[in-house]
Image (cartoon, rainbow, N blue to C red):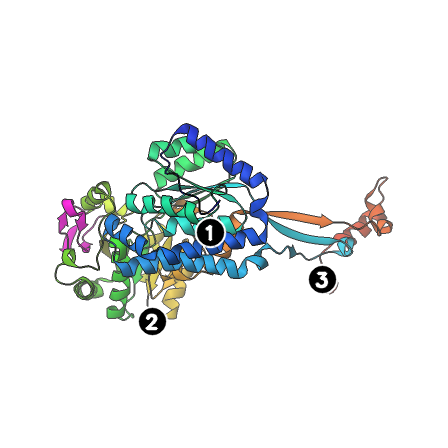
Amino acid sequence: MAGESPIRKSFTSSLCEEILKNSQEAFSSGRTKSYPFRLKQLQAMVNLLDKHELEFVAALEKDMHKPKFETILSEITTVRNEAIYAMNNLEQWMTPEPIQKSMTSFLDSCFVKKEPVGVVLIIGGWSLPVQLCLIPMIGAMAAGNTVVLKLSETCSHTADLLQTLLPLHLDNNCYQLVCGEHTELLEILEHKFDHVFYIGDHVTGKQVMQAAAKHMTPVTLVLGGKNPCYVDKSCDLAVTARRIAWARFINAGQNSLAPEYILCHLDIRDALIHELQMCIHEFYGENPQESQNYGRMASVDQYRRVKDFLLCGQVVFGGQTDENDRYIAPTVLIDVKESDPVMKDEILGPVLPIFTVESLEKAIQFINKRERPLAIYVFSHNPQVISEVLDNTCSGSFCSNDSMVQSLYTRLPCGGVGNSGVGIYGGKFSFDAFSHSRACLLRNTAIECVTYLRYPPYAEKQLRLMQWATSISRTNKWCHIL
């Protein structure tokens, strides 16, 4: 039960089997299915965040030099809002949904019932280690599942804090945690779960999908990608630069929804670069390494991976690095080749390449030559330009005249398409992702005088009558919902 002293658990195969067994037994008991239980656990999540906010601030400062402002906005507030939104709407979400009926079913009760799928494995992301663990967990909890949460080992202080606090607030039998390296994750995936949720890189995403396929387990994968940002001549460059710079360099660029590269006309490139440089100076001062508002790479491996991108093209400003501090300055690149590593892999760091294109049509072609991204951004005062990009591209999400803020809207889903992921989550979409939509028909026996028409021996008249009785009216004059 919540409130017991937490047992710090390091990974072993036997522990994984024990956790899975306990989760299956807890789900089989039916305790997670009731509305009062779900509501109580969601409230416990809110209480956890309220009570330990400053501890999360301290942990993320140690892990990523993350400013308090960023932690509270992107980690605490977003998760709290998600839990409160679920609490406010849970009863409605759990209510069976009636469906339109035909003449053969007008005396019957027809509805779709949302039921929990069972034991959900959530593999949390490291770039926003609180948000990317707890937001999907909230959806799984609201849907009535038991959860096994695999914490990211990259941000160790935050993982330790979550491993300590979650058992103190949530039901320990229904919601369990495990930490481990990549090899341990692969071993966890050998076990059968009822749904697997993963946020992270493409290589591991493919391994998750392959492992889940062995057990016919449905998956939700959020894999990121190369998010393009088209800057039109008509936009306000000062405002555009501020909004792009904020999204690209917040959390030291470690965000899968951040713009990955800019496409603009040559005529405005230098002016845009100047505005971006002014923004960096305004946001972080003359030396961002000394700023309390600028973060660090989450690990040395992540630092080295991003640092290698600085060898691509030409650095027009930024480019300073310090391995001991895991520091990479906010950096803008030009003269990057499309074949360079920085344009092949997701950056997840404070590096922003700028490409020039001759026209909007060329920009759309540039975007569509690549895999479908997690997000597409366009800055323009011309509604036609925005519509052209929206209608002629495909991405997980789309935002005009801003960057990343779509993730703050609880009613909008988050997820990818194609190479950037499978499935969506967030708000009601999380509830649906972790639920089974069960088709329910409660029949009445009083109209056998009509349904007998389906029985052999068959006749042409019976067939015509059955076609009429089961058809859907184009005007909906006789179709109704009870």
Residue shown at the point (23%, 40%) measured from the top left = 301
Please tell me in which quadrant of the rendered image residue 160 appears.
top left
Task: Give the residue at mark 2.
Answer: 381
Amino acid tagged 1 = Ile
The reply to whether the C-beta atoms of the residues labelled 3 and 2 are less than 8 Å apart is: no
Residue shown at the point (54%, 60%) measured from the top left = 89
Residue shown at the point (46%, 54%) measured from the top left = 44
The reply to whether the C-beta atoms of the residues labelled 1 and 2 are less than 8 Å apart is: no
Mark 1 falls on what kind of element?
helix
Horizontal and vertical percent position of residue 168:
42, 47
User: Of 236 and 264, which appears nearest the observer?
Assistant: 236
Check residue 138 in the rendering and tell me which mark sits there, or answer none.
1
User: Of 92 and 211, which appears nearest the observer?
Assistant: 92
Horizontal and vertical percent position of residue 222:
40, 47
Q: Please report whichever mark, 1 or 2, sits nearer to the chain's N-terminal start.
A: 1
**Between marks 1 and 2, how big is the CA–CA gap?**
38 Å
User: Of 109 and 203, which appears nearest the observer?
Assistant: 109
Check residue 480 in the rendering and tell me which mark sits there, or answer none.
3
